[in-house]
Image (spheres, grey):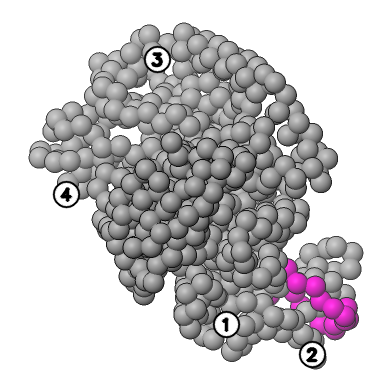
Amino acid sequence: MIELPAFFNDGMVIGLNARIWGWAEPGRRVVVEFLGERYEAEADCDGRFEVTVKANGYGGPYTMRIAEREIKDVYVGRVWLCGGQSNMETPLGRVRSLLGKYIADDGRIRVFQGEKGLRFDGPSRDIKGEWRYAQGEALESMYAVPYFFARALLESDPSPIGLICVPAGGTPIEGWLPEEIIRGYPALDESLRQCKQSGYIKEVTEKDAVRIQKWHGELEGGDPGLSEGWHRPDYNDAAWDEGFLTDSAEMTGHGSVWFRKRVTLPENIGSATLCLGRAINSVRVYVNGEWVHTVDYMYPPCTCAIPEGLLKPGENLIAVRVVGDALPPSFVPGKRYALEYSGGSVDLNGPWKRCIGKIMPKLEPGSWFYNRPCGVYNAMLAPVLGCTVDGMIWYQGESNVGNPRVYKELFTAFAGHVRSRYDADLPIVFTQLANYIDPNDMTGENWAVLREQQRQCLSLPDTAMAVTIDCGEWNDLHPLDKKTVGNRLALCARRLVYYEDIVSDGPVVKKAEYRNGELTIRFNHANGLWAKNGRPLIDVIDESGNTHRFYAEIKGETLTARIPSITIKRIRFGWSDCPPVTLYNAYNLPASPFEIEMLPVKRFCSTNPIP
């Protein structure tokens, strides 16, 4: 019997010259038949065989026979490898509230979503998964960025598209590196050696599970809200304090907090949806005494449909229990808090009745092995490398903002290794991190540093970068606008891979000049340059490392600013976690935040900073 990787199966999409491999008895001659052609290969001493099947054009469905295996419903089309972390694996179901009108069945798209997993003792040769059409119920769990990327590509090229998706949330770039690269970094190598120790992961995981279960057991057993029925309409909350969902001033500890609010509804409200923003770390929601929804961790939105018949005309009770373990219990400000129904809505941002359930010590989080070196590479990426694809889209970096200045080095190693598994440089289109963190907090720069590291990765050949500095949400690591992200990745792919003569970049900084007391920053792709949300801000770094901020003016395709008498070393734009101002060109494509050196150093004579 022969064995094939899971992605060589019914419903697959392959490229024009597709590498097909599998395993059989060593020395066995394996015959592959496709489109009237016959290919033969002999299994090597490890049992692996490989052939390259060819097609003259895109289309299908076809049948492929590999020895005794028959693979049906095969299409020849464009194939893309999709990887990264949680923003790449965010499902369509989570973004439907914002983008529902853009989500539709499209049988031209087929998706293989690899099963998440870890392995530290060496690369796996296969990954579990199956091919699915972008249709019906499958859409809800389908990854949003690859889906919108494919839909955008289909607008100019109707060829079938196959998406081989292997992202995993919470993974830094070192998790996607093979052991031969990790050996060059002593700290990472030691982390990998630890994970490879027999029984280590099992022991740590079991200890964490006992500790976490004990914490939650004490919380559940000591929370009077559970025993006294604080979720029931007949409970008397007259003695409770008043507070707002997003006011965390009194929630400085850990444990549970309860909220209750009575809302009056009219007749014939029809279907209803409860929107309670996002809770830290988990939330349980009741309506009129009945449980309706639970979110077990802090990132998914707390949005749920109310079962038909549960709400009634007149007074209704909403009760919410929030639990904070590693962080104090709270709701995230700036999100939507409302009860929506056919014909109207109730704003839930006003005062609620509030009472502390039980105060607990902080719960240290359990060990997270998805951030360890090689784990996801071995389990998820290694099995698919070498599969014939048109290119790779990559959305990752959030898990590297704690130590951002090595990202370019690690990503360069990553790209080099991935490309080593192909006959030529694989086109890689990557996503620059979106805006995040409160825009009023101008002190943070780790996200800005990581974005600059990503921008510098454009020095690698056959790469392109989708700028998403305007696609984020300051209060959410997982912004909902995955359509714009997918569209911009597709623009880059159409130029880089499909060779279309289109503009895919926003303004790209070229150089900075000084004349007569005026700094001028020049860009490429800056036709129709304009700014959103105010006047552009330029940061100037002097020879002592001090930062000076100035307003700039747009003059044609340049930014200009008057500079005081300082010695400039570097110039920055958009240098914060969540920049307040974005630059665009006439195609409404944003400029990347940037940092450039001012060489040679010049002394300027002016006196007025920001007016």
For label 1, the SS is loop
Above or below residue 465? Residue 340 is above
- Identity, as a three-letter code, of the amino acid under mark 2: Arg
Residue 5 locus on image (x, y percent) = 47, 43
- Identity, as a three-letter code, of the amino acid under mark 1: His
Q: Residue 492 carries which label?
A: none
The residue carrying mark 1 is 525
Q: How far apart are marks 4 and 2 (CA)?
A: 61 Å
Residue 374 locus on image (x, y percent) = 67, 40
Q: In which quarter of the image is the C terminus?
A: bottom right
Q: What stretch is highlighted in magenta?
A: 594-611
For label 2, the SS is strand
Q: Which of 340 and 16 is in front in this view?
A: 16
Tell me what residue is drawn at x 61 percent, y 33 percent. 119
Q: Which mark is residue 225?
A: 3
Q: Distance between the residues labelled 3 and 2?
A: 70 Å
